[in-house]
């Protein structure tokens, strides 16, 4: 707990530094005051919008310099916990944070939450690896660090804690609650001592909610679910389309900056993440057309920014879009039906529901509304809408924004739940390399001479060039001790084998398909590397499952 609290304090300091740096860039390029938010500006001088393509050009240059020395993509906390046991590179994370600060600071429609969580998780990973923590504890630390950074950014320790549980760690247990909560409390305390303005909007809704209101908010959750899926798919589609032009692909941020500058000419609220705009729009009197305009332009700006290569996230953009979508829902209900809900309450519920649809974490966003309003009734309504949104997105789409982008890169994970250990159970690691072999053209009598009954259960037959030619059961050769012929006549599984990189899921699939007890593991040119039995593979899988079960419940 003490170490986690220290990590949380570091994450809090990092949050203050990142937020201050990004806002400083906005002050420099857009001539706003220290206490002013960029997206709250009613008009931006056109010449100052050149900062957007300038920021895109800077990202192009930085990425070019970076990829000259490092080819691998940086790992975010979700991927690190799902596949790498919590291992993150501090160097890569600093680069991601710098890209995010440039993107947000130059006015692109992306949030800083990705940078906050990245640095918080990386700091925790570094601390855990320095202390040689076991895999489960390192994953908990990464969740604590990332959650602490979010708690610091929003001034909401419960939100940060459940962000860690639901989104970064993938589970909530007695074993991980203490370090995570210690980290989020420490981070929040640091930002308060630094007088860092949190991103959360402190506001309350006055409406007393009835049962009918909860049913209406469930409908809002449904709307948010489909809208969230549409935004995520549009980002993926934009990335796909722009990537099909290999000559111009490295220049995508520059082109995106030009498009964002053109959009900001008539919709300045699309600039940056949208904190100032959200403060204004939550209490403003907005009609249907104004809301549709704000929703469409902000969604378009976020899609362009992320699809064209700016670095950042959709966390706060989803909160802002959700608040607008909730207000639109309330206004439409009021105009065209007899049902009526408070527009402010609908904004807050929509804020949580759309964030769940895009980012994930029903409890995370419900606690954000609770810490924003202090209203338990409204929190329950948010949880209702969030659960509906989460259910619909999971059944129709299956991904959050972070895992969707990993899916586009070829990964198959759906959450931060630890599946990386499955990839360590490969055929190459589990096989027995000491394999008895014999030439496929050898006589059966030679087989009996070299391998007496009881000496081994099977022998691998080798063909020309010592290539795999099948597995010969010893019992089959001795079934007729006077039988003549060659070894190849007794060979089985001549077309079925494993490769060293196959994981346990693929291995068990081959065993099920062939019905065999043992399979050969082959390398390049069908050279035999070893043999793996189904019994041993199953036992190793069961051992790892039991180990992960103990880690999950905090047992030894």
Image: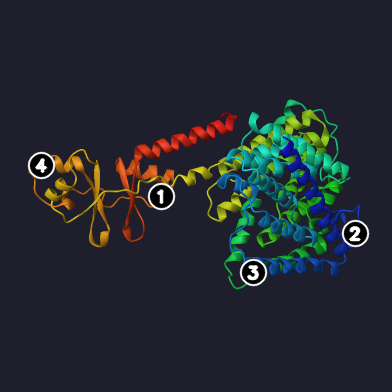
Query: Sequence order check: which comes first, mark 4 or mark 3?
Result: 3
Q: Mark 1 points at which residue?
A: 428
Can you tell which of label 4 and label 3 is closer to the viewer? 4
> Residue 246: x and y, percent?
58, 70
Q: Nearer the viewer, residue 1 or 74?
A: 1
Q: Mark 3 points at which residue?
A: 250
Measure how far apart labels 4 and 3 are at the Cα level: 70 Å
Residues packed near mark 1 inside 10 Å, few (<14), some (14 to 19) or many (20 plus): many
Q: Residue furthest top?
A: 211
Side of 110 where 243 appears, left or right:
left
In which quadrant of the rendered image does the C terminus lie?
A: top right
Side of 90 where 273 appears, left or right:
right
> Residue 409: x and y, percent?
56, 56
Q: Is residue 311 above or below residue 329?
A: below
Query: In this view of the protein, can residue 327 be seen by the observer?
Result: no
Query: Sequence order check: which comes first, mark 3 or mark 1?
Result: 3
Query: Sequence order check: which comes first, mark 1 or mark 4?
Result: 1
Query: Sequence order check: which comes first, mark 2 or mark 3?
Result: 2
Measure how far apart labels 2 and 3 are at the Cα level: 31 Å
> Which image quadrant for residue 526?
bottom left
Q: Mark 2 points at which residue?
A: 32
Helix, strand or loop at mark 2: loop
* Residue 481, label in figure: 4
> Residue 499: x and y, percent?
38, 52
Measure how far apart labels 3 and 1 are at the Cα level: 38 Å
């Amino acid at each position: 707990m003490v170490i986690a609290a220290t990590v949380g304090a570091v994450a809090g300091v990092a949050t203050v530094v990142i937020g201050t740096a990004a806002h400083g860039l906005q002050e420099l390029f857009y001539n706003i005051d220290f206490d002013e938010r960029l997206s709250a500006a009613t008009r931006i001088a056109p010449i100052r919008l050149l900062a957007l393509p300038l920021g895109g050009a800077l990202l192009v240059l930085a990425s070019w310099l970076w990829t000259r020395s490092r080819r691998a993509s940086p790992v975010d906390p979700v991927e690190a916990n799902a596949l790498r046991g919590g291992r993150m590179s501090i160097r890569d994370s600093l680069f991601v944070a710098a890209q995010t600060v440039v993107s947000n600071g130059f006015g692109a429609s992306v949030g800083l939450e990705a940078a906050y969580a990245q640095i918080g998780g990386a700091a925790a990973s570094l601390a855990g690896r320095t202390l040689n923590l076991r895999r489960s504890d390192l994953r908990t630390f990464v969740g604590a660090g990332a959650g602490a950074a979010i708690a610091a950014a929003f001034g909401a320790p419960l939100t940060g804690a459940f962000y860690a549980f639901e989104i970064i760690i993938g589970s909530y247990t007695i074993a991980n609650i203490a370090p995570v909560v210690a980290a989020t409390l420490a981070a929040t305390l640091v930002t308060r001592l630094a007088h860092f303005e949190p991103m959360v909007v402190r506001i309350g809704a006055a409406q007393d909610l009835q049962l009918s209101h909860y049913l209406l908010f469930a409908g809002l959750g449904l709307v948010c679910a489909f809208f969230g899926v549409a935004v995520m798919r549009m980002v993926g589609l934009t990335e796909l389309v722009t990537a099909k032009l290999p000559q111009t692909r490295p220049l995508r941020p520059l082109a995106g900056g030009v498009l964002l500058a053109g959009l900001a000419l008539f919709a300045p609220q699309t600039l940056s993440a949208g904190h100032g705009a959200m403060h204004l729009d939550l209490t403003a009197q907005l009609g249907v057309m104004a809301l549709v305009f704000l929703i469409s332009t902000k969604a378009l700006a976020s899609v362009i920014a992320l699809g064209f290569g700016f670095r950042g996230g959709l966390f706060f953009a989803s909160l802002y879009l959700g608040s607008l979508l909730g207000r639109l829902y309330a206004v439409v209900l009021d105009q065209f039906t007899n049902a009526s809900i408070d527009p402010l309450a609908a904004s807050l519920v929509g804020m949580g529901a759309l964030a769940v649809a895009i980012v994930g974490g029903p409890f995370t966003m419900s606690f954000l509304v609770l810490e924003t309003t202090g209203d338990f009734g409204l929190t329950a309504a948010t949880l209702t809408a969030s659960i509906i949104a989460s259910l619909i997105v999971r059944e129709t789409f299956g991904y959050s924004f972070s895992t969707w982008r990993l899916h586009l890169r070829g990964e198959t994970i759906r959450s931060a739940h630890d599946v990386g250990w499955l990839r360590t159970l490969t055929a190459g690691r589990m096989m027995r390399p000491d394999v008895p072999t014999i030439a496929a053209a050898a006589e059966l009598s030679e087989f009996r001479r070299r391998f007496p009954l009881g000496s081994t259960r099977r022998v691998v037959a080798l063909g020309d060039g010592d290539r795999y030619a099948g597995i010969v059961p010893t019992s089959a050769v001795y079934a007729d001790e006077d039988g003549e012929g060659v070894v190849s006549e007794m060979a089985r599984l001549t077309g079925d084998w494993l490769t060293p990189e196959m994981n346990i899921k693929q291995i068990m699939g081959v065993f099920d398909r062939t019905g065999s007890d043992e399979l050969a593991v082959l390398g390049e040119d069908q050279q035999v590397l070893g043999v793996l039995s189904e019994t041993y593979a199953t036992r190793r899988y069961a051992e790892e499952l039991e180990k992960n079960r103990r880690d999950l419940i905090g047992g030894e």
